[in-house]
Image: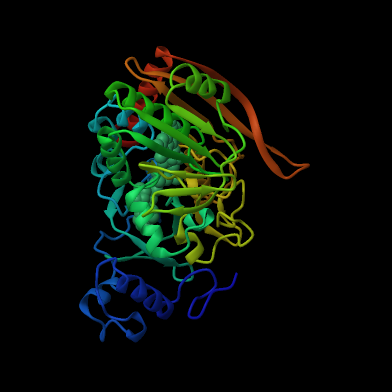
Amino acid sequence: MSGGKGVKRNGISRRGFLKSGGATLAGGAIGIGAAGTAVASSESSPPAIARLLRKATLPAASGARVVVVGGGWSGLTLAKYLKRFNPDFDVVLIDRQSAFVSFPVSNAWLADQVDLDFLSHSFFDAANNHGYRFMAATVLGFDRDSRRVFTEQGYVDYDYLVLAPGIEYDYPRIGVDDPEAQELLFHRYPGGFVTSSELLTIKRKIHRFRGGTFVLTVPSGDYRCAAAPYERACMVAAVFRRRRVRAKILLLDMNSDIVIKREGFARAFDELYGDSIEYLPSSEISALDVDARRIETDFDEYEFDDAIIYPPVRASRLIEEAGIHNPEDPQKAPDTDPFRYHLRNDEHVYVAGDSRAQPFSKGGHTAHSEAQYVAEVIAAHARGREIAWRSPQTMCFSAVDIEPLRAMSIITYYKYDSTTGLFAFDRTHLIDRWDTQGGQASLAWAEGMYRDLFYG
Ligand SMILES: Cc1cc2nc3c(=O)[nH]c(=O)nc-3n(C[C@H](O)[C@H](O)[C@H](O)COP(=O)(O)OP(=O)(O)OC[C@H]3O[C@@H](n4cnc5c(N)ncnc54)[C@H](O)[C@@H]3O)c2cc1C
């Protein structure tokens, strides 16, 4: 593993951190204009920079400290189960957001089938109920030599570090390279797959849309929640139908066919939304003009009145910036042991959830079942033991209609094929006939998950 100038092995040296951290902050994280390159020590630093070099205000660790970065489905589960498998661990969960808003079931929320309270939960409740600490902060980087995580509120030392920071959009893969154009595209036509503000913007859009052409895209590659873009097209169409808006929904799929629950979605597009959804497979996006509201694919060009642009995704930049990614992987996933989840050369740093390298479905349920296993792996490691590998479980409900809510589902496991060296699906149970029982089951599933993550 090599690093850039001032970067040690896979981590960031104190000097390198100051340089890169200073540059990042000058770019706006907390809005200070000082050039990071000029900073040599905390004594000569502006106060805000000096703060980065101080220990974060946390009680002293009561046992081996496990720092979990990211309080999504993976990180919340990890924090809870690390304490369960080893009550002596001092677990600190760090997230840059101050509250949790669920992506699963958010498509039903877009169509008013649940309210925001159903999706929103407090990190404080999770931490209080499960006996770990929560810190609202942004992780800027980490140094594996000193086992230190840097945040804008100071650093935290770790014995084990678990990275569960999720995904980011990869706009260059749809021909949008310029950072300004990327920002414009993200803010005007958010994909709704990374932050909760995107969801609020999308809800407002579809409830105010006055008619015309509305574009939704499905990315290629290993993107987050394979079924969700198709489900979202159905929910948008259902809202337009209820509002009696004359709209053409163009569903531009970068894949050659519907990638999951194919029969069920094809039937929904045909039977429920034949007059509004036009499904266009193999629509590889080659260019996008935000101001002109024009999208180009390899075959055609489309003008739109409004859009939800979901580009391909990549692992969190935190992983690439630390130099722990696999340079061969277009999604910049980490270079980890596929069964134990730790970096190949460091058994004190783990990566789980949608940032993982393994090709398991990027789903909340997958992240939840996987995180229980990873927590057990870490607890065993601390005791000098190992546990047998077990597959994560994927369970995914997809709503296709409202009033009443109707949904379908899939459950699957994974197996490792030692001859090919690849993971494949195992024991799959698909119900692609959507009905009201599926709709109710989807809400019951989500309630059960929130209970486990925050209250149980
Ligand atoms: C619309 C939609 C519908 C979905 N439906 C389903 C479904 O029905 N079933 C299902 O199983 N899954 C579903 N999913 C997928 C599911 O939401 C994800 O797979 C799941 O959230 C992945 O969990 P994660 O913890 O890896 O990532 P996330 O949940 O994204 O969590 C990552 C966390 O890390 C934090 N973070 C990132 N970087 C930093 C940093 N530098 N410092 C501090 N914090 C940081 C973020 O704030 C975030 O809270 C859906 C997703 C979407 C968008």
Quarter residue 247 falls in:
top left
- At 53% from the left and 66% from the top, the residue drawn is 323
Q: Position of residue 123 (x, y in %)?
A: 27, 44
Front residue of this view, candidates 271 and 50 = 271
Please indicate whether residue 377 sits to the left or right of residue 242 in the image. right
* Residue 92 makes an appearance in the image: no
- At 36% from the left and 58% from the top, the residue drawn is 183
Front residue of this view, candidates 102 and 384 = 102
Quarter residue 390 falls in:
top right
Q: Check the image and tell me how it is coloured.
A: rainbow
Please indicate whether residue 379 sits to the left or right of residue 114 in the image. right
* Residue 401 makes an appearance in the image: yes
Task: Tell which residue pokes out farthest to the right in this image.
Answer: 419
Classify 93 as above or below 275.
below
Q: Position of residue 148 (x, y in %)?
A: 40, 66
Classify 196 as above or below 62.
above
| Quadrant in the picture for the N terminus | bottom right
Quarter residue 83 falls in:
top left
